Image: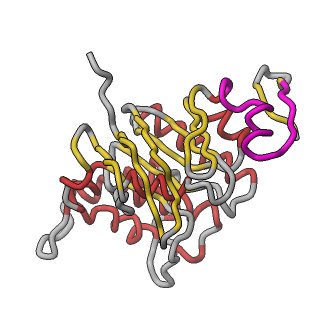
């Protein structure tokens, strides 16, 4: 019996502004997976993520959600199944955290219906799951960087997606908040069974948190598999042109030292 697939790409190629960005990419993501994507700047990681959520349409090949072509879904149908958290956010000046998170309910609302008690409960739960409920009445622009990232994450959770795509969710955060966000994502993956696909720069974070890692170089997938099998000094040298050594911490965790 074939393994069910949450998302899949079949021989995808993308050209942006006459520049080839992705070359013949095939990929399968199974439900409940925690997949990290790593690679040098400009290798196509963010473009790949946008193809997966139908923000970019490929010139050739096809993308699938639950076995159906992405192109066969309406925007509202897609938003009920998957959510994406991009690198940069427009921070609203006069919007509270609760109001921001409530925007995640847009796939389920009409202009003529007031939010139900059930919807309000979903918004409250999204804030609780993202660890931001205590800030519900604060203006978003007054939050710290880590709190803002949690608020936007809560907005995506309010969509009730089965799949969560994140483009470098730890960018602009200090190390404490980076680890807080990744711990939270790991918890959401385990407790809510969310399928998570995220782009990461830090290879030690990919080693620590992901169950599978995909390595990209010049618009192609050059390696994928268990992080401990894929993220090696040899791969780092071949893909990033950097020398590193594998080490084991006192707690037994494998890390790379540069």
Q: Is residue 213 magenta?
A: no
Q: Quadrant of residue 195?
A: top left
From the viewer's perspective, is residue 116 above or below residue 164? below
The single residue placed furthest to the left in the displayed view is 112
Of the pair 255 and 187, the residue shown nearer to us: 255
Pick the residue in front: 45 or 133. Answer: 45
**Residue 18: percent from left, percent from top:** 48, 70
Q: Is residue 170 left or right of residue 89?
A: right
- The stretch of residues the image draws in magenta is 228-247
As drawn, 35 above or below 173: above
In the displayed structure image, the side of residue 215 where residue 27 appears, left or right: left
Report the side of 172 relative to 189 (left or right).
right
Q: Is residue 209 visible?
A: yes
Residue at point 69%, 52% (across, down):
40
x then y, percent, for residue 49: 47, 53
Residue 240 magenta: yes
Task: Give me the residue at 65% from left, 48% from top.
Answer: 39
Identify which residue is drawn at 13% across, 70% down: 113
Position of the N terminus by quadrant: top left
């Amino acid at each position: 019996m074939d393994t069910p697939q949450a998302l899949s790409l079949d021989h995808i190629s993308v050209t942006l502004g006459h520049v080839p960005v992705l070359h013949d990419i095939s990929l399968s993501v199974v439900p409940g997976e925690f997949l990290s994507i790593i690679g040098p700047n400009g290798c196509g990681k963010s473009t790949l993520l946008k193809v997966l959520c139908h923000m970019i349409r490929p010139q050739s090949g096809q993308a699938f959600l639950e076995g159906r072509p992405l192109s066969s879904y309406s925007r509202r149908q897609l938003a009920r199944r998957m959510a994406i958290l991009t690198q940069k956010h427009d921070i609203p000046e006069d919007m509270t955290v609760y109001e921001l998170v409530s925007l995640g309910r847009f796939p389920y609302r009409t202009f003529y219906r007031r939010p139900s008690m059930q919807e309000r409960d979903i918004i409250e739960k999204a804030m609780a799951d993202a660890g931001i409920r205590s800030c519900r009445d604060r203006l978003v622009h007054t939050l710290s960087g880590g709190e803002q990232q949690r608020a936007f994450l809560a907005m995506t959770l309010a969509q009730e997606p089965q799949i969560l795509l994140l483009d470098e969710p730890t960018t602009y955060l200090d190390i404490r908040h980076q680890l807080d966000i990744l711990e939270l994502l790991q918890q959401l993956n385990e407790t809510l069974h969310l399928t998570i696909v995220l782009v990461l720069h830090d290879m030690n974070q990919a080693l620590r948190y992901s169950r599978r890692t995909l390595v990209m170089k010049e618009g192609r997938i050059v390696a994928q598999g268990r992080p401990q099998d894929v993220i090696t000094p040899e791969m780092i040298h071949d893909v990033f042109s950097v020398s590193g050594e594998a080490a084991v911490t006192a707690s037994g965790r494998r890390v790379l030292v540069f």
